[in-house]
Image (spheres, rainbow, N blue to C red):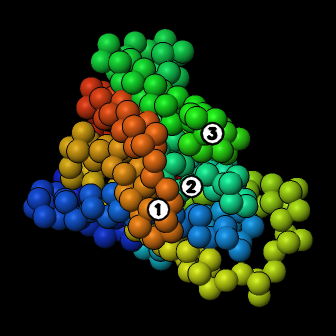
Protein backbone atom coordinates (compact mmCIF):
# COMPACT_ATOMS: atom_id res chain seq x y z
CA UNK A 1 0.00 0.00 0.00
CA UNK A 2 1.00 3.49 -0.25
CA UNK A 3 -0.15 5.68 2.58
CA UNK A 4 0.37 5.60 6.32
CA UNK A 5 -2.39 3.96 8.38
CA UNK A 6 -3.65 5.97 11.35
CA UNK A 7 -1.99 5.40 14.71
CA UNK A 8 -5.09 4.95 16.82
CA UNK A 9 -5.69 2.69 19.77
CA UNK A 10 -8.26 0.95 17.63
CA UNK A 11 -8.11 0.66 13.88
CA UNK A 12 -10.43 -0.45 11.13
CA UNK A 13 -9.96 -3.58 9.09
CA UNK A 14 -10.96 -3.57 5.39
CA UNK A 15 -14.49 -4.61 6.35
CA UNK A 16 -14.85 -1.58 8.60
CA UNK A 17 -14.68 -3.58 11.83
CA UNK A 18 -12.93 -2.28 14.94
CA UNK A 19 -9.76 -4.15 15.87
CA UNK A 20 -8.32 -3.84 19.34
CA UNK A 21 -4.63 -3.27 19.86
CA UNK A 22 -2.41 -5.46 21.97
CA UNK A 23 -3.10 -8.91 20.52
CA UNK A 24 -1.32 -11.96 21.88
CA UNK A 25 1.83 -13.39 20.30
CA UNK A 26 -0.13 -16.31 18.82
CA UNK A 27 -2.33 -13.98 16.77
CA UNK A 28 0.65 -11.94 15.58
CA UNK A 29 2.54 -15.04 14.47
CA UNK A 30 -0.54 -16.46 12.77
CA UNK A 31 -0.81 -13.31 10.65
CA UNK A 32 2.94 -13.33 10.01
CA UNK A 33 2.86 -16.96 8.83
CA UNK A 34 0.03 -16.06 6.46
CA UNK A 35 2.20 -13.34 4.91
CA UNK A 36 5.23 -15.64 4.78
CA UNK A 37 3.48 -18.57 3.13
CA UNK A 38 0.81 -16.92 0.99
CA UNK A 39 3.00 -14.19 -0.50
CA UNK A 40 5.85 -16.67 -0.93
CA UNK A 41 3.52 -19.09 -2.73
CA UNK A 42 2.21 -16.55 -5.23
CA UNK A 43 5.27 -16.96 -7.45
CA UNK A 44 4.38 -20.62 -7.94
CA UNK A 45 0.74 -19.60 -8.43
CA UNK A 46 1.79 -17.29 -11.25
CA UNK A 47 3.75 -20.05 -12.95
CA UNK A 48 0.77 -22.42 -12.84
CA UNK A 49 -1.71 -19.74 -13.97
CA UNK A 50 0.30 -18.88 -17.10
CA UNK A 51 0.51 -22.51 -18.19
CA UNK A 52 -2.73 -22.03 -20.15
CA UNK A 53 -3.68 -18.40 -19.46
CA UNK A 54 -2.10 -15.53 -21.42
CA UNK A 55 0.26 -13.88 -18.91
CA UNK A 56 -0.93 -10.28 -18.97
CA UNK A 57 -4.58 -11.32 -19.28
CA UNK A 58 -4.20 -13.43 -16.14
CA UNK A 59 -2.62 -10.55 -14.23
CA UNK A 60 -5.31 -8.09 -15.37
CA UNK A 61 -8.09 -10.49 -14.35
CA UNK A 62 -6.50 -11.10 -10.97
CA UNK A 63 -6.20 -7.47 -9.96
CA UNK A 64 -9.52 -6.38 -11.46
CA UNK A 65 -11.37 -9.11 -9.54
CA UNK A 66 -9.52 -8.38 -6.29
CA UNK A 67 -10.24 -4.65 -6.65
CA UNK A 68 -13.94 -5.33 -7.25
CA UNK A 69 -14.22 -7.53 -4.15
CA UNK A 70 -12.36 -5.08 -1.92
CA UNK A 71 -14.35 -2.11 -3.27
CA UNK A 72 -17.62 -3.94 -2.59
CA UNK A 73 -16.61 -4.72 1.01
CA UNK A 74 -15.55 -1.11 1.61
CA UNK A 75 -18.76 0.21 0.06
CA UNK A 76 -20.98 -2.07 2.13
CA UNK A 77 -19.17 -1.27 5.37
CA UNK A 78 -18.39 2.39 4.83
CA UNK A 79 -21.39 3.67 2.94
CA UNK A 80 -21.63 5.71 -0.29
CA UNK A 81 -18.58 7.86 0.48
CA UNK A 82 -16.23 5.03 1.39
CA UNK A 83 -14.31 5.20 -1.89
CA UNK A 84 -14.35 8.98 -2.33
CA UNK A 85 -10.99 10.60 -3.14
CA UNK A 86 -9.93 13.81 -4.85
CA UNK A 87 -8.33 13.97 -8.28
CA UNK A 88 -4.81 14.31 -6.98
CA UNK A 89 -5.18 11.29 -4.71
CA UNK A 90 -6.70 9.31 -7.56
CA UNK A 91 -3.86 10.22 -9.90
CA UNK A 92 -1.24 9.33 -7.31
CA UNK A 93 -2.85 5.96 -6.60
CA UNK A 94 -3.12 5.25 -10.31
CA UNK A 95 0.56 6.07 -10.90
CA UNK A 96 1.70 3.86 -8.04
CA UNK A 97 -0.62 1.07 -9.19
CA UNK A 98 0.78 1.16 -12.72
CA UNK A 99 4.38 1.02 -11.46
CA UNK A 100 3.72 -1.73 -8.93
CA UNK A 101 1.29 -3.94 -10.81
CA UNK A 102 1.67 -3.30 -14.54
CA UNK A 103 5.42 -2.78 -14.34
CA UNK A 104 6.43 -4.77 -11.29
CA UNK A 105 4.05 -7.70 -11.30
CA UNK A 106 3.40 -7.69 -15.05
CA UNK A 107 7.06 -8.16 -15.93
CA UNK A 108 7.42 -10.98 -13.41
CA UNK A 109 4.41 -12.72 -14.95
CA UNK A 110 5.95 -12.37 -18.42
CA UNK A 111 9.27 -13.73 -17.17
CA UNK A 112 7.60 -16.80 -15.67
CA UNK A 113 5.65 -17.56 -18.86
CA UNK A 114 7.09 -19.05 -22.00
CA UNK A 115 8.34 -22.47 -23.10
CA UNK A 116 10.72 -24.55 -20.98
CA UNK A 117 14.24 -23.17 -21.05
CA UNK A 118 13.13 -19.57 -21.46
CA UNK A 119 10.81 -19.12 -18.47
CA UNK A 120 12.28 -18.09 -15.12
CA UNK A 121 11.53 -20.64 -12.35
CA UNK A 122 9.21 -19.28 -9.66
CA UNK A 123 11.79 -19.61 -6.90
CA UNK A 124 14.42 -17.71 -8.90
CA UNK A 125 11.89 -14.97 -9.67
CA UNK A 126 11.24 -14.56 -5.95
CA UNK A 127 14.95 -14.32 -5.22
CA UNK A 128 15.41 -11.65 -7.89
CA UNK A 129 12.42 -9.67 -6.62
CA UNK A 130 13.97 -9.78 -3.14
CA UNK A 131 16.35 -7.08 -4.37
CA UNK A 132 13.54 -4.50 -4.12
CA UNK A 133 14.61 -3.18 -0.66
CA UNK A 134 18.13 -2.78 -2.04
CA UNK A 135 16.90 -0.82 -5.06
CA UNK A 136 14.84 1.45 -2.82
CA UNK A 137 17.99 2.31 -0.85
CA UNK A 138 19.70 3.33 -4.10
CA UNK A 139 16.73 5.54 -5.02
CA UNK A 140 16.90 7.20 -1.61
CA UNK A 141 20.61 7.87 -2.14
CA UNK A 142 20.02 9.44 -5.56
CA UNK A 143 17.45 11.82 -4.06
CA UNK A 144 19.80 13.05 -1.35
CA UNK A 145 19.09 10.69 1.53
CA UNK A 146 22.07 9.30 3.43
CA UNK A 147 21.49 5.66 4.41
CA UNK A 148 23.68 4.12 7.07
CA UNK A 149 26.97 2.37 6.36
CA UNK A 150 25.52 -1.06 7.13
CA UNK A 151 22.61 -0.34 4.80
CA UNK A 152 25.08 0.19 1.96
CA UNK A 153 26.91 -2.96 3.05
CA UNK A 154 23.63 -4.88 2.76
CA UNK A 155 22.97 -3.41 -0.69
CA UNK A 156 26.43 -4.40 -1.87
CA UNK A 157 26.03 -7.91 -0.49
CA UNK A 158 22.60 -8.30 -2.08
CA UNK A 159 23.76 -7.26 -5.53
CA UNK A 160 26.75 -9.59 -5.23
CA UNK A 161 24.23 -12.38 -4.70
CA UNK A 162 22.34 -11.22 -7.78
CA UNK A 163 25.52 -11.49 -9.84
CA UNK A 164 26.25 -14.95 -8.44
CA UNK A 165 22.72 -16.04 -9.32
CA UNK A 166 22.69 -15.00 -12.98
CA UNK A 167 26.31 -15.13 -14.16
CA UNK A 168 26.89 -18.20 -16.35
CA UNK A 169 29.02 -21.01 -14.97
CA UNK A 170 30.46 -23.93 -16.93
CA UNK A 171 29.07 -22.48 -20.12
CA UNK A 172 25.50 -22.15 -18.91
CA UNK A 173 23.51 -19.80 -16.74
CA UNK A 174 21.53 -20.65 -13.62
CA UNK A 175 18.55 -18.89 -15.15
CA UNK A 176 17.66 -17.61 -18.64
CA UNK A 177 19.41 -14.23 -18.84
CA UNK A 178 16.61 -12.48 -20.75
CA UNK A 179 14.05 -13.68 -18.22
CA UNK A 180 16.25 -12.67 -15.30
CA UNK A 181 16.68 -9.17 -16.72
CA UNK A 182 12.91 -8.96 -17.19
CA UNK A 183 12.37 -9.78 -13.51
CA UNK A 184 15.01 -7.24 -12.48
CA UNK A 185 13.25 -4.61 -14.63
CA UNK A 186 10.04 -5.50 -12.82
CA UNK A 187 11.81 -5.13 -9.47
CA UNK A 188 13.03 -1.67 -10.54
CA UNK A 189 9.48 -0.63 -11.45
CA UNK A 190 8.18 -1.99 -8.13
CA UNK A 191 10.93 -0.13 -6.28
CA UNK A 192 10.13 3.19 -7.99
CA UNK A 193 6.44 2.74 -7.18
CA UNK A 194 7.24 1.92 -3.55
CA UNK A 195 9.59 4.89 -3.32
CA UNK A 196 7.09 7.35 -4.79
CA UNK A 197 4.17 6.10 -2.72
CA UNK A 198 5.61 7.69 0.42
CA UNK A 199 6.34 10.99 -1.29
CA UNK A 200 3.13 11.85 -3.14
CA UNK A 201 -0.37 12.56 -1.86
CA UNK A 202 -2.22 9.25 -1.60
CA UNK A 203 -5.75 8.43 -0.33
CA UNK A 204 -5.78 8.52 3.47
CA UNK A 205 -7.33 5.04 3.75
CA UNK A 206 -4.76 2.46 2.62
CA UNK A 207 -7.46 0.00 1.54
CA UNK A 208 -9.12 2.63 -0.64
CA UNK A 209 -5.73 3.39 -2.17
CA UNK A 210 -5.32 -0.31 -2.91
CA UNK A 211 -8.61 -0.41 -4.82
CA UNK A 212 -7.53 2.37 -7.18
CA UNK A 213 -4.00 1.00 -7.51
CA UNK A 214 -5.32 -2.40 -8.53
CA UNK A 215 -7.86 -0.91 -10.94
CA UNK A 216 -5.21 1.24 -12.63
CA UNK A 217 -2.76 -1.64 -12.81
CA UNK A 218 -5.41 -3.97 -14.23
CA UNK A 219 -6.42 -1.41 -16.86
CA UNK A 220 -2.85 -0.94 -18.11
CA UNK A 221 -2.22 -4.68 -18.07
CA UNK A 222 -5.37 -5.19 -20.16
CA UNK A 223 -4.23 -2.59 -22.71
CA UNK A 224 -0.81 -4.22 -22.95
CA UNK A 225 -2.45 -7.61 -23.35
CA UNK A 226 -4.45 -6.27 -26.31
CA UNK A 227 -1.31 -4.76 -27.85
CA UNK A 228 0.49 -8.11 -27.54
CA UNK A 229 -2.41 -9.92 -29.18
CA UNK A 230 -3.14 -11.96 -26.07
CA UNK A 231 -6.90 -11.54 -26.32
CA UNK A 232 -6.87 -13.24 -29.72
CA UNK A 233 -5.22 -16.23 -28.06
CA UNK A 234 -7.47 -16.22 -25.01
CA UNK A 235 -10.12 -18.93 -25.23
CA UNK A 236 -11.63 -19.60 -21.78
CA UNK A 237 -12.68 -23.12 -22.76
CA UNK A 238 -9.04 -24.01 -23.42
CA UNK A 239 -7.83 -22.85 -20.01
CA UNK A 240 -7.12 -25.74 -17.67
CA UNK A 241 -8.86 -26.12 -14.33
CA UNK A 242 -5.40 -26.00 -12.77
CA UNK A 243 -4.76 -22.52 -14.19
CA UNK A 244 -8.20 -21.19 -13.18
CA UNK A 245 -7.65 -22.44 -9.62
CA UNK A 246 -4.21 -20.82 -9.54
CA UNK A 247 -5.70 -17.51 -10.68
CA UNK A 248 -8.39 -17.71 -8.00
CA UNK A 249 -5.71 -18.47 -5.42
CA UNK A 250 -3.66 -15.45 -6.50
CA UNK A 251 -6.67 -13.18 -6.19
CA UNK A 252 -7.87 -14.44 -2.80
CA UNK A 253 -4.68 -15.54 -1.05
CA UNK A 254 -2.20 -13.04 -2.50
CA UNK A 255 -4.22 -9.90 -3.13
CA UNK A 256 -6.79 -10.08 -0.33
CA UNK A 257 -5.94 -12.37 2.60
CA UNK A 258 -2.16 -11.88 2.84
CA UNK A 259 -2.41 -8.19 2.13
CA UNK A 260 -5.03 -7.71 4.86
CA UNK A 261 -2.86 -9.67 7.29
CA UNK A 262 0.10 -7.43 6.40
CA UNK A 263 -1.83 -4.22 7.01
CA UNK A 264 -3.03 -5.61 10.34
CA UNK A 265 0.53 -6.54 11.32
CA UNK A 266 1.75 -3.00 10.64
CA UNK A 267 -0.66 -1.85 13.35
CA UNK A 268 0.12 -4.57 15.90
CA UNK A 269 3.71 -5.78 15.52
CA UNK A 270 7.21 -4.22 15.34
CA UNK A 271 8.01 -3.21 11.78
CA UNK A 272 11.40 -4.95 12.06
CA UNK A 273 9.52 -8.22 12.57
CA UNK A 274 6.95 -7.58 9.85
CA UNK A 275 9.65 -6.67 7.33
CA UNK A 276 11.16 -10.14 7.58
CA UNK A 277 8.72 -11.19 4.84
CA UNK A 278 11.21 -9.63 2.39
CA UNK A 279 13.66 -12.44 2.94
CA UNK A 280 11.36 -15.27 4.04
CA UNK A 281 9.18 -15.11 0.91
CA UNK A 282 12.02 -16.14 -1.44
CA UNK A 283 12.85 -19.16 0.74
CA UNK A 284 9.20 -20.24 0.69
CA UNK A 285 9.01 -19.75 -3.08
CA UNK A 286 12.16 -21.80 -3.76
CA UNK A 287 11.00 -24.61 -1.47
CA UNK A 288 7.51 -24.79 -2.99
CA UNK A 289 8.88 -24.69 -6.53
CA UNK A 290 11.18 -27.61 -5.77
CA UNK A 291 8.58 -29.66 -3.92
CA UNK A 292 5.52 -29.13 -6.11
CA UNK A 293 6.82 -28.64 -9.66
CA UNK A 294 10.35 -30.04 -9.39
CA UNK A 295 12.17 -26.78 -10.09
CA UNK A 296 15.90 -27.47 -9.86
CA UNK A 297 17.91 -26.14 -6.93
CA UNK A 298 21.55 -25.98 -7.90
CA UNK A 299 24.56 -25.02 -5.82
CA UNK A 300 24.67 -21.70 -7.71
CA UNK A 301 21.03 -21.01 -6.87
CA UNK A 302 21.59 -21.81 -3.20
CA UNK A 303 24.72 -19.66 -2.97
CA UNK A 304 23.35 -16.67 -4.89
CA UNK A 305 20.01 -16.86 -3.11
CA UNK A 306 21.61 -17.07 0.31
CA UNK A 307 23.76 -14.00 -0.38
CA UNK A 308 20.75 -12.00 -1.65
CA UNK A 309 18.67 -12.94 1.41
CA UNK A 310 21.56 -12.04 3.72
CA UNK A 311 21.91 -8.64 2.07
CA UNK A 312 18.19 -7.92 2.34
CA UNK A 313 18.17 -9.08 5.97
CA UNK A 314 21.03 -6.70 6.76
CA UNK A 315 19.20 -3.78 5.12
CA UNK A 316 15.91 -4.56 6.88
CA UNK A 317 17.45 -4.94 10.34
CA UNK A 318 19.68 -1.87 9.91
CA UNK A 319 17.00 0.44 8.59
CA UNK A 320 14.22 -0.52 11.01
CA UNK A 321 11.60 1.66 9.23
CA UNK A 322 9.28 3.60 11.44
CA UNK A 323 6.14 1.86 12.56
CA UNK A 324 3.14 2.49 10.32
CA UNK A 325 4.81 2.55 6.92
CA UNK A 326 2.14 1.08 4.75
CA UNK A 327 2.51 -1.82 2.34
CA UNK A 328 2.30 -2.10 -1.38
CA UNK A 329 -0.57 -4.12 -2.65
CA UNK A 330 -0.13 -6.78 -5.08
CA UNK A 331 2.34 -8.60 -3.86
CA UNK A 332 2.47 -11.02 -5.92
Answer with mark 1 or mark 3, whichever residue precedes in sequence.
Answer: 3
The local crowd at label 1, few if under 14, some if 14 to 19, many if 20 or more residues have their Cα within 10 Å, is many
Spot occupied by residue 90 in the image (x, y as percentages of width and height): 63, 48
Instruction: Give yes or no for contact between labels 2 and 1 (Cβ–Cβ under 8 Å).
Output: yes
* Closer to the eye: label 1 or 3: 3
From the top left corner, tell me how far across and down residue 24 is, in percent: 10, 61
Helix, strand or loop under label 2: loop
Q: Which residue is mark 2?
A: 121
- Badge number at residue 172: 3
Label 2 and label 1: CA atoms lie apart by 8 Å
Mark-to-mark CA distance, 2 and 3 = 16 Å
Residue drawn 48% across the image and 16% down it:
141
Q: Are the two marked residues, 1 and 3, in contact with CB atoms closer than 8 angstroms?
A: no
Please give the label number shown on residue 289.
1
Asked if residue 102 is positioned above or below residue 67 in the image, the reply reads above
- Is residue 126 among what the camera can see? no
Whether residue 151 is visible, yes or no, is yes
SS label for mark 3? loop
Q: Secondary structure at mark 1?
A: helix
Q: Sort mark 3 into few (<14), some (14-19) or many (20+) by Cα contacts within 10 Å.
A: few
Whether residue 284 is situated above or below residue 308 in the rendered picture:
below
* In the depicted structure, whether residue 291 falls above or below residue 95: below
- Residue visible at 89% across and 71% down? 232
Give left or right: position of 273 versus 205.
Answer: left
Judge left or right: residue 157 versus residue 103. Answer: left
Amino acid sequence: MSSTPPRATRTADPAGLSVATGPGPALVWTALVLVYVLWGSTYLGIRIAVETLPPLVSAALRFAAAAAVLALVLRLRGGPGALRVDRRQLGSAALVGVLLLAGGNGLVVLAESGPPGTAVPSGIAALLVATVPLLVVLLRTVTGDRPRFWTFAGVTLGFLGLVLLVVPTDGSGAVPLAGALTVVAGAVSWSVGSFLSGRIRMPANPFVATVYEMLAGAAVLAVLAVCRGELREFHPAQVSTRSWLALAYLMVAGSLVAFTAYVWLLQHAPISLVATYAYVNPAVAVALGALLVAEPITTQVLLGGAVIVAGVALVVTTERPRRGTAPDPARR
